[in-house]
Image (cartoon, rainbow, N blue to C red):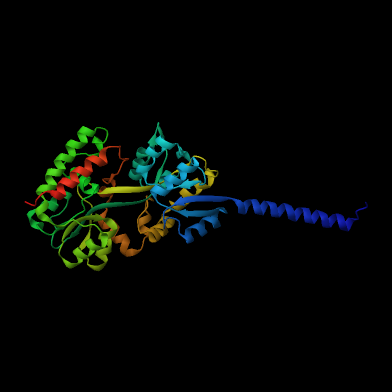
Amino acid sequence: MIINKTMKSAMMGVTALAGLAFVAGSAQAEELRLLTWGGYAPDEVVKLFKEETGIDVKVTKSNNEEMIAKLRATGGGGFDLAQPSQDRVAGAQAENRIYKPMDLSKIDASQFITSMLEATKKSTTYDGEAYGVPHVWGTSGLVVDTKKASMVKDYTDLCSDDVKGKVSYRLKRPTLIGFAFSMGLDPFAAYADEAAYAEVMGKVEEKLISCKGNVKTYWEGGDSLLNLMRSGEVTAAMAWDTGGWKLNGDNPDITFVAPKSGALGWIDAFVLPKKGKNDDAAYKWINFVMQPEIAAMITASAGNFTASKGADAFAEEKLKAQFQTSFPAADLDNIKWYPPVPAGLETIEGKVLDRVKAAKSN
């Protein structure tokens, strides 16, 4: 068969176009499969990431229980990056081997709040290797009407006669933990010894029973607490930072206060699933979203701040002012981050809470 110059040029052109199409298709095919919470990967952030890197982000929204169940079912497959809470990492790795260690040399540590990065590395360490770095976080502490209950600076101040009958908190483990720290005890240090932990909880139980006369009600739903604070029936409570800031938007006298003994903090981390196929894209995403300006976009979407250093400067003005008032640097570094809960401790806590609930008010 004789191929003339025109046909040959045309065929070469088709071949070149096919090659370009293959290259373009390959670039478009790069994808980060992200298993995360609602609000942590807003569309505008995903778009900016793709514009900068060319990487598509496939977002699957989930929660702690579902994340771990999905990864356990696949042996750590199906996703390249996941975001369980930091206290759900080391235990899940020990039981199921569903993650791979973080290569911290690929993380831009300068973008993280140091105390949060160190706390998360510590809490997610298993067999000598860190499996997580921090992302979104929040706390529980005190929500106080500063005109009517200015003396409330720590959890045990809720037992002061100055706020008798005007106090509310939940009968849940954060209350036990918070009161323990406020009493000069360290419940987290006792986690490894059930007997020691039971002793700590026994002292907290006595304190909570003696404090029952101060409690207007034990709140359960967040909306009910907000209404109690708005009406003035309650002037001091244990609650989340976001609840306190929401109330502050309605009444500048009410706000979230970080307790002297330390707010209690949770962190949703970044982890690498064991069978993830695109670690490079995962590290790029982590470093991208920890940029202060990008982190502020995630705060606007999720409602909580991130561990990005300086991101509060880019937050909406009202929220920025609330955050900076509630969390000066010393209070930020004093947050008590929840470690993994060993088996058996929830049973001890449950019995203490039952006895507190059943006890008569003094």
Q: Which image quarter: residue 9?
A: bottom right
Residue 189 pos. (x, y %)? 25, 36
Q: Position of residue 231 (x, y in %)?
A: 18, 67
Q: Position of residue 52 (x, y in %)?
A: 54, 55
**Residue beneath the point at 90% across and 53% down:** 3
Residue at image location 38% in from the left, 55% down from the top: 311
**Which residue is most to the right?**
2
In the depicted view, which residue is nearer to us: 303 or 69? 69
The image quarter containing residue 334 is top left
Q: Is 59 located above or below residue 318 in the figure?
A: above
- Residue closest to the eye, 104 or 271: 271
Question: Residue 169 location in percent, x, y?
Answer: 19, 54
Visible residue check, residue 298: yes
| Front in this rendered view, residue 106 or 141 | 141
Vertically, is 222 above or below 77?
below
In the rendered structure, the answer to whether residue 81 lies left or right of residue 160 reads right
Q: Is residue 223 left or right of residue 18?
A: left
Q: Name the image quarter holding residue 221.
A: bottom left
Residue 269 relative to residue 213: left or right? right
User: Does residue 272 appear in the picture of this structure?
Assistant: no
How many tags in the picture? 0
> Foreground: 327 or 230?
230
In the rendered view, does 344 fall on the left or right side of 65? left
